[in-house]
């Protein structure tokens, strides 16, 4: 049994990338359990690649990632990644979160339907359940994707730029939800370029050119972001 202070994720000398291109180089760090961790860095620094590696959808080319839980992590893509022609309702979207437990073609159980309803309620989108996902605002769509992730009942929630393109109110709603999840014991890891969002996190990782430049408290890491020169 893992102790309370055991990291949710241990990363040791991680290298990862695509085809012959290495994106991440020698990443070694821990992700604290039941906390909100923000991954910061400019575009192309490797934030999404690191999330994919932690999620297990991208195999490392070197080093290792150890997750404290055997449960599959829940990965939330950006709301803008949803195809505009996808003919699926909000309820169907959230129900897909149960597929890891049932498989995509097996009927959901009564317990599954209860979990879907609870996740819709928690995200405040129960009244949108019959709406087409593509008819929602960006903030509503992001909450539907969050509800889908919650339906997986994973202890590790990974999000790629969850507030990008959202208005201030929607950003604050998403931020509040992530904080509540961490308080409930979920480990939240989000890639972000929003400094205000990063400051609300408990822990930060700063990437640049695929390397870990700084890690620790948000204020300290954000200070390091401006003090480390950019490679020419």
Image (cartoon, rainbow, N blue to C red):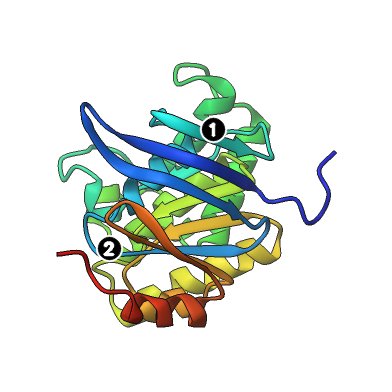
Q: Which residue bears the numbered disc 1?
A: 98
Which quadrant of the rendered structure holds the C terminus? bottom left
Q: Which residue bears the numbered disc 2?
A: 138
| Extreme residue in the top direction | 105
Label 1 sits on a secondary structure element that is helix
**Residue nearest the viewer, comparing 26 with 34:** 26
How packed is label 2: few (under 14 Cα within 10 Å), some, or many (20 or more)?
A: many
Q: Position of residue 136 (x, y in %)?
A: 27, 59
Q: Which residue shows up at 53% across the image and 63% down it?
A: 37
Q: Is residue 37 above or below residue 210?
A: below
Numbered label attached to residue 192 = none
Q: Which residue shows up at 50% across the image and 80% down it?
A: 220
**Residue nearest the viewer, comparing 166 with 191:** 191
**Residue nearest the viewer, comparing 100 with 60:** 60
Label 2 sits on a secondary structure element that is helix
Q: Is residue 85 above or below residue 170?
A: above
- How far apart are the two marked residues, 1 and 2, measured between alpha carbons? 23 Å
Is residue 107 shown left or right of residue 186? left
**Residue nearest the viewer, comparing 85 with 71:** 71
If you read the primary sequence from the N terminus, does the residue marked by circle 1 or circle 2 appear first?
Answer: 1
Q: Which residue shows up at 56% across the image and 75% down it?
A: 217
How packed is label 1: few (under 14 Cα within 10 Å), some, or many (20 or more)?
A: many
Q: Is residue 228 above or below residue 154?
A: below
């Amino acid at each position: 049994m893992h102790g309370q202070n055991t990291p949710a994720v241990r990363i040791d000398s991680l290298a990862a990338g695509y085809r012959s291109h290495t994106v991440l180089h020698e990443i070694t760090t821990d992700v604290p359990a039941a906390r909100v961790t923000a991954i910061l860095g400019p575009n192309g620094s490797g934030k999404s690649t690191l999330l994919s590696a932690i999620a297990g959808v991208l195999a490392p080319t070197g080093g290792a990632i150890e997750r404290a839980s055997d449960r599959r992590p829940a990965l939330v893509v950006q709301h803008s990644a949803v195809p505009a022609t996808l003919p699926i309702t909000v309820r169907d979207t959230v129900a897909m979160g149960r597929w890891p437990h049932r498989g995509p073609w097996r009927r959901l159980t009564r317990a599954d339907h209860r979990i879907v309803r609870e996740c819709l309620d928690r995200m405040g989108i129960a009244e949108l359940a019959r709406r087409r996902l593509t008819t929602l605002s960006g903030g509503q769509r992001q909450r539907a994707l969050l509800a889908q992730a919650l339906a997986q009942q994973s202890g590790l929630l990974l999000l790629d730029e969850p507030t990008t393109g959202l208005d201030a109110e929607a950003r604050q709603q998403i931020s509040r939800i992530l904080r509540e999840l961490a308080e409930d014991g979920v480990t939240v890891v989000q890639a972000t370029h929003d400094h205000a969002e990063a400051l609300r996190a408990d822990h930060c990782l700063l990437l640049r050119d695929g390397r870990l430049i700084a890690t620790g408290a948000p204020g300290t890491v954000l200070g390091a972001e401006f003090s480390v020169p950019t490679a020419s």
